[in-house]
Image: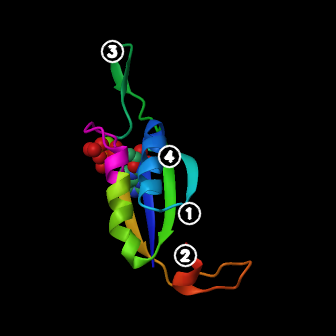
């Protein structure tokens, strides 16, 4: 079991969601976040002085998946979130030690999707 965490452009959320649904991945959490990557957000010139390091609006996706769905999940996010310009985002994959569905008490891969 893996937890896929992705930071994407807010305006690409719908495209990513459609790709995920096409891959039969429906269970996800989505939050609005502020973030910066290698370009440190963006810089501004104020009265001739370059200053202000800003945080940009991004969307964070968290998706718990069984092993068979890891690659389809990564592909869906990569394709849906891609523009080719700086700021397209990043995807992290973490190991999930255990999962438990509260209502049914299912555990492990059964609890995943
Ligand atoms: N190492 C990181 N840790 C946590 N969040 C990150 C990290 N890298 C990127 N992010 C998140 O992803 C968002 C988009 O990052 P971004 O696409 O600018 O990454 P980048 O590494 O600068 O790549 P690029 O050069 O394509 O812009 C950031 O605003 C931030 O929310
Ligand atoms: Mg960047």
Camera-near label (1 vs 4) is 1
Q: Which mark is residue 48?
A: 3
Who's the residue at 48% across and 49% down the image? 17
Residue at which label 2 appears: 112
Question: Quadrant of the image for the C terminus?
Answer: bottom right
Residue 110 % position (x, y)? 56, 82
Q: Which residues are magenta?
A: 78-90
For mark 2, give the secondary structure. loop
Q: Which mark is residue 27?
A: 1
Tell which residue pokes out farthest to the right in this image.
Answer: 103
Which residue occupies the foreground of this view, 69 or 51?
69
Which residue occupies the foreground of this view, 46 or 87?
87
For mark 1, give the secondary structure. loop
In the rendered view, tell whether residue 32 sits above or below residue 101: above
Residue at which label 4 appears: 59
For mark 4, give the secondary structure. strand
């Amino acid at each position: 079991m893996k937890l896929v965490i992705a930071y994407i452009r807010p305006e690409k959320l719908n495209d990513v969601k459609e790709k995920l649904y096409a891959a039969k991945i429906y269970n996800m959490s989505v939050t609005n976040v502020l973030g910066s990557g290698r370009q440190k957000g963006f810089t501004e010139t104020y009265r001739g002085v370059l200053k202000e390091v800003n945080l940009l609006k991004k969307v964070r996706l968290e998706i718990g998946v069984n092993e068979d769905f890891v690659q389809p999940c990564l592909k869906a996010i990569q394709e849906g979130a891609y523009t080719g310009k700086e700021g397209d985002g990043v995807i992290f994959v973490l190991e999930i030690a255990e999962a438990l569905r509260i209502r049914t008490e299912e555990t492990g891969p059964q609890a995943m999707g």
